[in-house]
Amino acid sequence: MRQLLIIDDQSILVDDLAEMLPWHKAGIDTVFKAYSGYEALEIMNEQPIDVVLTDIRMPGMSGLELIREIKQNWKHTKCILLSGYADFEYTKQALQLRSSDYLLKPASDEELLGAVSNAIEELEREWQEISSIQRAMYSLREQLPKLREYLLLDLLSGKQSAEPQRLMPKLAMYDIPFRKDDSFHVMLLRLDDAGGLYEGGDSEALIDYALANMAEEIFGERMDLWHAKDPHGFLVCLLREKESDGTEEVRLETEDWLERRAFQLQHVVKSYLRVGISVLTSKAGSFPIDAGPMYQASITNFRHFIGSEQELFVSLAKEPTREGTPPQLLSELYRPPMLLQLLEIGQWEAAEEKLNAIFGELEGQWKDSQEHVLETYFSIAATLAALVHKNKQWLSDTISSDFHEYANGRPIAKVEELRSWSFRVIENYRNSVRTEEKDSRSGIIRKAQEYINEHLDNASLHSISAHVFLNPSYLSKIYKTETGEGISEYMLRARMEKAADLLSQTEEKIYEISQMLGYQKPSYFIQLFKKHYGLTPQEYRNKLN
């Protein structure tokens, strides 16, 4: 998933470089184009770019100024400069900015591919060092990280008091830079398919450490991280801004920064650990009093907004939240991870294993105990009722004919009957969750498509996501999942279909149609139209006549 960005004010040169060279041979999967430094920065804010190939002399913002901005905000992005002048001053500035290469125009295809390939290899070495097993093994032998992890888990579970006079001395002892009333965010990270990594011989602890190390690299320049692996398999991170004046403007900017960095973390983990992750970030809270409640709310919202889907990102600063209160439980029913929490976060296979463990204990030790059978029944029934009502549904609609076990007031008393009923109603609940998620997403897709067709001249991923009140990365993921087509592909198709309609039904000139559809360069519009229909716009119009 390596991504290249090409920048030059000569659009024809950019288009030729992007489309004519076999970039896959240099390890590039996706190529983005920009025709100015400012447009390049907009793309950098939206996409995790690995390598930048830019001209030096451009109007507005020069290539050197662009690289300086990139190095300040995306320090791992590799930059390659193109110049038509063998000027020593340019070369010296490029070296000072730690550019990966400096090529003179006209550069051959081999030079360009070689420079990009070298930059990718350099990037690989950097991230391999950051996530190296040797560093992980060395750090794991140290006791302080484990003490910090245990303290965080105790704080989140309530075993450690959040009273400042009890907590602050431990924070100081463990060199944890969180203080009373600090603003912080909770971030949950989930490895979506790490089975292949573990099967390859790497231990779970080392992989988790590599993930935490990457998170510290991405967020650490601006925020302090305190992280631990929780019983549900999440890497839980508390994020505290190192310097902040606490204003509303800074808060909003911080949340946007968190979103961009979370998206970048997904990209580097996919590229260098070869596994996808899902990420959820919370709203800001006050440390330490909000730590436990915010963590529990994040777990609940992870299930609601991500569930079993993979490689999604959700920011609760931009999403409505659905908070729940965990029950107080005992025995195998109450041993973490608890059934309610597994169902809330959509861990269906783990929930089935939990039920088997519950009934294994019940049949092995308490089969003849009416009280234990009733205890199990009431616990599972209460869990199901809480989940269904939290999702604003009726039990009678969710579990159908099994509802009479609730309504007639006679609880199930036999273990075999209870086992069958429990698996059946939980499967019905799982199906209702799937239906609810699909219906909700269908409405989002419909609203997004309506907006695109009404704003063909200026629709963008950001404007569409604002219209449907979702963050761009989350909208892109669910659109692709539901339709099998990328949202940018749909926008292109809608514009081309509209162009064909205007060519056949009106006398508008081609450059006028180009502007009506948001293309400022008619040559680029003509190129896209020909690629889509196999004819230029004029050839298409002539054929109709």
Image: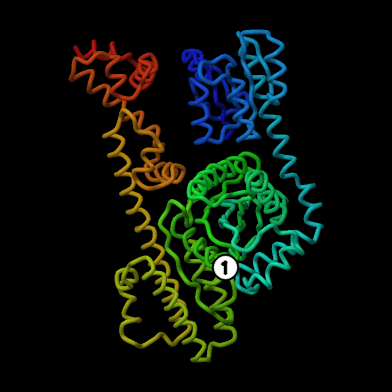
Q: Is residue 65 above or below residue 438?
A: above
The structure residue drawn at horizontal position 67% and vertical position 54%, both measured from the top left corner, is 208
Q: In this figure, which colouring scheme has been used for the structure?
A: rainbow
Q: Is residue 121 above or below residue 290?
A: above
Judged left or right of residue 492, residue 182 is right
Closer to the camera, 127 or 77?
A: 77
Residue 248, x across and y down, in percent: 48, 50
Closer to the camera, 290 or 471?
A: 290
Corner quadrant of residue 482: top left
Tally the marks: 1
Residue 308, x across and y down, in percent: 48, 56
Closer to the camera, 93 or 497?
A: 93
The residue that label 1 is drawn on is 289
Judged left or right of residue 288, residue 317 is left
The structure residue drawn at horizontal position 42% and vertical position 53%, both measured from the top left corner, is 319
The structure residue drawn at horizontal position 73% and vertical position 68%, both measured from the top left corner, is 169
Where, quadrant-wise, is the N terminus in this rendering?
top right
Residue 325, x across and y down, in percent: 48, 72
Q: Residues within 10 Å of mark 1 (few under 14, many from 20)?
A: some
Amino acid type at circle 1 is Ile
The structure residue drawn at horizontal position 69% and vertical position 56%, both measured from the top left corner, is 204
Judged left or right of residue 377, residue 338 is right
Where, quadrant-wise, is the C terminus in this rendering?
top left
Residue 156, x across and y down, in percent: 60, 67
Label 1's element? Answer: loop
Q: Is residue 227 above or below residue 273?
A: below
